[in-house]
């Protein structure tokens, strides 16, 4: 989870457990840890949630890093979080995860633009607003200007319909490995 989610949780007086890599890689041990400590919330990828299963004390799952549509919510309240290291963007409680929208921006706006930067129904998702990082240590990212940041080009392809914004692919060649 991001620094933002950690601070919100601490502000509400919850206990946060940080598990080490060795434990995290043993899904049965993680399930036992969750149940032994009566954990109620977790932030994880959808594939990790599928491996974890439904036999836990958890009630709320924050899914991120993968398409939420592959989640079987079962008994859980599922919150779809969309964002990146470069920008805190949105989260949305999900009633139906089959074709889950990503929600709307926290503080700013999400637009879809074509290759020329014009607003479009399908194209690259661009975040405009506060919450964008200023750059990387010793370098500036190719899609993040060094001046005050008016927008962040996510590299995600999206479409908007009556239910909201949906991620449909990637513009670039970034590869996610789970």
Image (cartoon, rainbow, N blue to C red):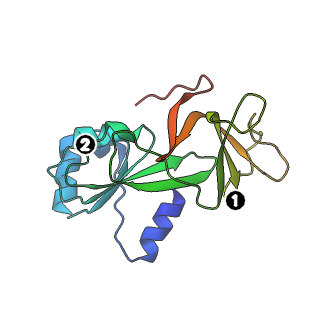
Counting from the top left corner in percent of width and height, residue 145 is at: 81, 43
Query: Does residue 1 show up?
Result: no
Counting from the top left corner in percent of width and height, residue 91 is at: 48, 55
Q: Residue at x 77, y 40 (%)?
A: 140
Counting from the top left corner in percent of width and height, residue 72 is at: 25, 42
Kindly indicate whether the residue at mark 2 contacts the one at mark 1 (C-beta within 8 angstroms): no
Which circle's residue, 1 or 2, is located before the other in the chain? 2
Q: Is residue 12 above or below residue 178?
A: below
Q: Residue at x 23, y 58 (%)?
A: 58
- Indicate which disc residue 130 carries: 1
Q: Nearer the viewer, residue 135 or 117?
A: 117
Residues packed near mark 2 inside 10 Å, few (<14), some (14 to 19) or many (20 plus): some
Q: Nearer the viewer, residue 78 or 112?
A: 112
* For residue 115, side relative to residue 176 (left or right): right
Q: Is residue 99 above or below residue 7?
A: above
Q: Quadrant of residue 98?
A: top left
Q: Is residue 16 above or below residue 156?
A: below
Query: Does residue 70 show up?
Result: yes
Counting from the top left corner in percent of width and height, residue 45 is at: 38, 42
């Amino acid at each position: 989870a991001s620094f933002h989610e950690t601070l919100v949780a601490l502000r509400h007086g919850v206990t946060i457990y940080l598990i080490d890599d060795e434990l995290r890689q043993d899904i049965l041990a993680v399930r036992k840890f969750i149940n032994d400590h009566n954990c109620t919330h977790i932030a994880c990828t959808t594939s990790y949630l599928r491996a974890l299963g439904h036999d836990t004390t958890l009630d709320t799952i924050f899914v991120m890093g993968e398409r939420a549509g592959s989640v079987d919510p079962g008994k859980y309240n599922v919150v779809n979080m969309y964002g990146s290291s470069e920008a805190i963007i949105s989260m949305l409680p999900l009633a139906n995860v089959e074709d889950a929208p990503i929600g709307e921006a926290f503080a700013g706006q999400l637009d879809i633009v074509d290759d020329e930067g014009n607003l479009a129904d399908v194209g690259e998702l661009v975040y405009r607003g506060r919450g964008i990082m200023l750059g990387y240590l010793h370098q500036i990212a190719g899609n993040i200007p060094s001046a005050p940041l008016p927008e962040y080009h996510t590299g995600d392809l999206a479409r908007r319909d009556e239910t909201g914004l949906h991620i449909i692919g990637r513009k670039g060649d970034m590869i996610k490995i789970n």
